[in-house]
Image: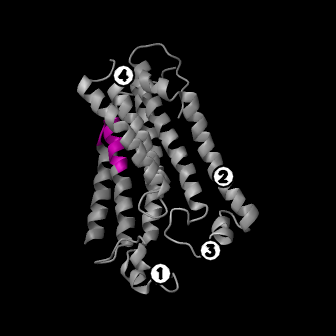
């Protein structure tokens, strides 16, 4: 029950950092290239799912506990709402791109060029990654306690 | 013709969702229906020999910084793709909900067959 063979463990310990870095790249360049918050968040969560498959659920729970993942989820949602409200406050409309209008006129196709769009991409990436990680973790917990243990069944995603 | 194939895929999913007795197969049928609708929406925005709607360095006018009209006339419609991305997110959430319901029902009744789930158990 303690994970897979040593080949899978070694390869996944090499690859996990690359997958995580690729997810961060997809999130940060979401306004220039295909990708964005959702796809990058899925990739971030899939690196943790790889660890979960290779090492077992307890290892991943020690690495990223449920409470911290839940807090990251909430922080992503609040950041996204904060970007929207700041657009309402400074730009005059909900989700107005106030940074682009005031501070970055004429710049395009750079990394820091799209105003608030990379900020909301980062927020969505946090939200999607943490919540997908939570969904898969709670589903695997669900399977475990249905298989015969007597854990309490209060987990919700 | 292609729209008819989309409709056929939707009907296959509907058939699977209605006639199968295994809960996991019903979930698969619902997901096939969702994918048929997504495919239909994507094909609505398709343009023959179109290019991907991603603006690169070569697609801007060097003097004014505006997007060239040849890019606008040649690219496919990006709006259905963005909407389908949202729809994929929603279908992911509903898929997680359906799978968790299946796991709970299996834990309570020890079967996936919907004809064997008859009695209410507390």
Mark 4 element type = loop
> Is the residue under label 1 in contact with that under label 2 (CB below 8 Å)?
no
Between the C-alphas of marks 2 and 4, the distance is 43 Å
Q: Nearer the viewer, residue A136 or B8?
A: A136
Mark 2 element type = helix
Q: Residue at x 31, y 63 (%)?
A: B7
Which chain is disc 1 placed on? B
Residue B6 is tagged as: none
Residue holding disc 2: A81
Disc 1 versus disc 4: nearer the observer: 1
Between the C-alphas of marks 4 and 3, the distance is 63 Å
Disc 3 versus disc 1: nearer the observer: 3
Question: Magenta region's main secondary structure?
Answer: helix
Between the C-alphas of marks 1 and 4, the distance is 60 Å
Residue A105 is tagged as: 3
Dividing the picture into quadrants, the one containing residue B1 is bottom left
Crowding near the residue tagged with mark 2, few <14, some 14–19, many ≥20 C-alpha atoms within 10 Å: some
- Residue A133: image location, x then y, percent: 47, 36
Q: Which residues are magenta?
A: B20-31
Between the C-alphas of marks 2 and 1, the distance is 31 Å
Residue holding disc 1: B67
> Is the residue under label 3 in contact with that under label 4 (CB below 8 Å)?
no
Residue holding disc 4: B110
Dividing the picture into quadrants, the one containing residue B35 is bottom left
- Residue A68: image location, x then y, percent: 57, 31
């Amino acid at each position: 029950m303690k994970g897979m063979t040593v080949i899978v463990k070694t390869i996944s310990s090499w690859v996990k950092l690359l997958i995580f870095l690729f997810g961060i790249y997809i999130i940060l360049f979401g306004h220039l290239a295909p990708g964005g918050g959702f796809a990058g968040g899925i990739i971030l969560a899939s690196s943790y799912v790889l660890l979960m498959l290779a090492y077992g659920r307890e290892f991943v729970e020690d690495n990223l506990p449920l409470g911290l993942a839940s807090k990251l989820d909430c922080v992503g949602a609040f950041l996204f709402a904060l970007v929207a409200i700041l657009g309402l406050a400074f730009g005059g409309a909900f989700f107005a791109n106030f940074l682009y209008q005031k501070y970055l006129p004429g710049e395009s196709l750079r990394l820091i060029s799209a105003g608030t769009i990379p900020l909301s991409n980062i927020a969505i990436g946090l939200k999607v990654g943490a919540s997908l990680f939570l969904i898969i973790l709670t589903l695997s917990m669900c399977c475990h306690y249905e298989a015969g243990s007597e854990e309490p069944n209060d987990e919700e995603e | 013709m292609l729209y008819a194939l989309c409709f056929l895929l939707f009907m296959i999913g509907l058939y699977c969702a209605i006639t199968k007795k295994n809960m996991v197969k019903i979930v698969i049928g619902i997901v096939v229906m969702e994918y048929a609708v997504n495919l239909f929406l994507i094909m609505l925005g398709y343009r023959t020999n179109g290019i991907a709607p991603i603006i690169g360095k070569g697609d801007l006018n060097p003097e004014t910084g505006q997007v060239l009209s040849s890019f606008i006339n040649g690219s496919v419609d990006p709006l259905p793709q963005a909407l389908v991305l949202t729809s994929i997110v929603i279908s992911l959430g509903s898929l997680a909900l359906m799978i968790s319901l299946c796991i709970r029902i299996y834990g309570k009744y020890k079967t996936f067959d919907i004809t064997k789930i008859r009695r209410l158990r507390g």
